[in-house]
Amino acid sequence: MIAYNQLYEIMKTPKANQKGPLNNIDDWEDDLLMRYPESGDKAKTKEEFRNYVDSERVDTVKEFYRLNHKYQTYNFVVSKEQEFLRLNKREMSLWEAVDFLNTLIDDSDPDIELDQLQHLLQTSEAIRADGHPDWFVLTGFLHDIGKVLCLFGEPQWAVVGDTFPVGCAFSDKVVYSEFFNENPDTLNDKYNSKYGVYSKNCGLDNVKMSWGHDEYLYQIMKDYLPEPALYIIRYHSFYAQHKENAYEHLMNKKDVEMFEWVKKFNPYDLYSKAPVPPNVEELRPYYEGLVSKYLPNTIRF
């Protein structure tokens, strides 16, 4: 298990765990809100969200996706699966993992006021307020825990960002798809056709996705949570499908059914964040009980 003095050492080194162009690891989510603004009476103006017109932020997000699209190849994903999916990096409780996520705050960014735990609680509390099952609430609480990949030195572009299938043609519905021109798989006949190494409606369980916190956490949680929760965790960043329907040709009937849960989760993920922090002290006992209901005391990462 990770010791708290180790967490302290991490916190003393600014950005040591955020290798990449983004000033803050969550800046890619600001870009999502620009692409998919909330609709209806509760919609916020761009000015009400964080400072999206900051040209530096736009440039860093663009550079982030250039790196992501250049290096997320089929062979890269295979290498990361071999490196991380043995789950032998560290054993720690969920709460220790959350404590690490709270180090992913850039103190130099004046727009960042809430830590990762508060953001997770905002998502899960919005789900709970709407009366959803407790496993759905728990999914909202832990869906971004896979960002602990940063603890193991992974660059930003291999932790966060929109996910997409590798091993077949990249869709132009993926954000900044022009950067796939730098990806060697684009020129590889094995991978650059519509189906690539897959077959029609083969099912997403047979498809390799770009490497990041989604797939990593899915592999960690797959023995503990209900299937809809696992779909949410594994595909919540797969915007090219659940927003753009770009990869339906790879999905089977079960995927289509389960993606209704992914779509149901998405508004809570995107639009539940607000400047008012939740009361962590009051909420923690409820979430401790929820975590203990579904998860073991320690988890292998």
Image: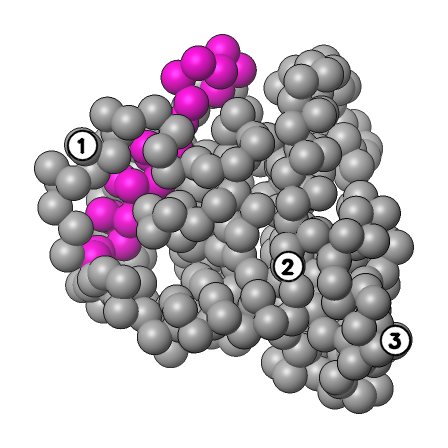
The one nearer the camera, 204 or 86, is 86
Across and down, in percent, residue 162 comes to: 67, 50
Q: Amino acid at mark 2?
A: Gln
Q: How is the image coloured?
A: one colour
Q: Amino acid at mark 1?
A: Tyr
Segment colored magenta: 92-112
Magenta region includes residue 106: yes
Image marks 1 and 2: residues in contact by CB distance under 8 Å: no
Across and down, in percent, residue 119 comes to: 46, 35
Comes first in the chain, label 1 or label 2: 1
Residue at 65%, 22% (x, y): give it: 57
Q: What kind of element bears circle 1? A: helix
Q: Quadrant of the C terminus?
A: bottom left
Q: Is residue 265 left or right of residue 213?
A: right
Q: CA distance from mark 1 to mark 3?
A: 48 Å
Q: CA distance from mark 1 to mark 2?
A: 32 Å
Residue at 49%, 16% (x, y): give it: 109
Comes first in the chain, label 1 or label 3: 1
Q: Which mark is residue 8?
A: 1
